[in-house]
Amino acid sequence: AQKVTQAQTEISVVEKEDVTLDCVYETRDTTYYLFWYKQPPSGELVFLIRRNSFDEQNEISGRYSWNFQKSTSSFNFTITASQVVDSAVYFCALSGRGSTLGRLYFGRGTQLTVWP
Amino acid sequence: GAGVSQTPSNKVTEKGKYVELRCDPISGHTALYWYRQSLGQGPEFLIYFQGTGAADDSGLPNDRFFAVRPEGSVSTLKIQRTERGDSAVYLCASSPGLAGGQEQFFGPGTRLTVL
């Protein structure tokens, strides 16, 4: 079974603070994909990043960085120097292969509020 | 280019009524997905299409839910005899194909309220 756990329901920070959003996943597939999506107040899910299970290199994109660790089944997301515009709900998601190909399994999301 | 569009953006209906929700995917995308998002939850998979056929409908909660994609482009999610528990945001997404790990592009959703 595929499962994603985002234990942090809500996080509040003050602008310019760094913040890390946690994501833990479960899967029996050897090939799988991990995603992060952002859902601003407007409601539309915005793709941020995809990693496949064979690529454990960390990735940095501007103020965003991702730490993928297979040993702990985690795919954490860090925002450096947070800004008010980062306020949104962030979802981690998992996609497998075989009979579940095509489905995204989402966590419950983390509501991030950045205060000015 | 145009993204995924969904109509209506909001739908209010009475318990027991029939509703149709429409999704227009990104042009050229062969895979189309429906998800349902309840308040405070992540999206939950309902069904996806590759072309005109439903490749996986195992997420549909019961036989009151049905979806079609007759020409391989626009899709309609149909809900019969609506119940209050059907109230949620229904999200549609599309992707260029069905290869593993494809990014799914989401529409703005239809907020369904069943009174």
Image: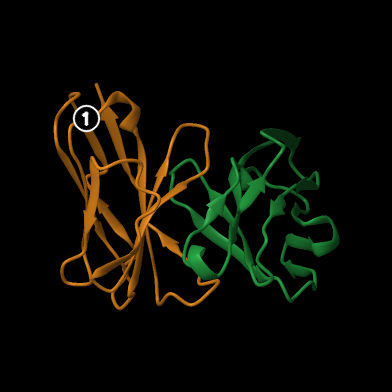
Position of residue B74 relative to residue B19, above or below, is below
Position of residue A44 relative to residue B4, above or below, is above
Q: Colour of chain B?
A: orange
Rendered-image quadrant of the N terminus of chain B: bottom left
Position in image of residue A59 (x %, y %): 75, 69
Residue located beneath label 1 in the image: B12
In the image, what residue occupies the spot 78% across and 63% down? Answer: A68
- The quadrant in which residue B87 appears is top left
Q: Which chain did the renderer colour green?
A: A
Q: In this view, does A43 lie to the left or right of A65?
A: left
Which residue in the rendered view is the most extreme toward the top? B115
Observer-nearest residue: A108 or B110? A108
Q: Is residue A43 left or right of residue A7?
A: left
Position in image of residue A109 (x %, y %): 60, 42
Rendered-image quadrant of the C terminus of chain B: top left
Position in image of residue B73 (x %, y %): 23, 70
In the image, what residue occupies the spot 77% across and 51% down? Answer: A81
The type of residue carrying mark 1 is Val
Position in image of residue B94 (x %, y %): 37, 66
Position of residue B85 relative to residue A104, above or below, is above
Position of residue B102 relative to residue B110, above or below, is below
Parent chain of label 1: B
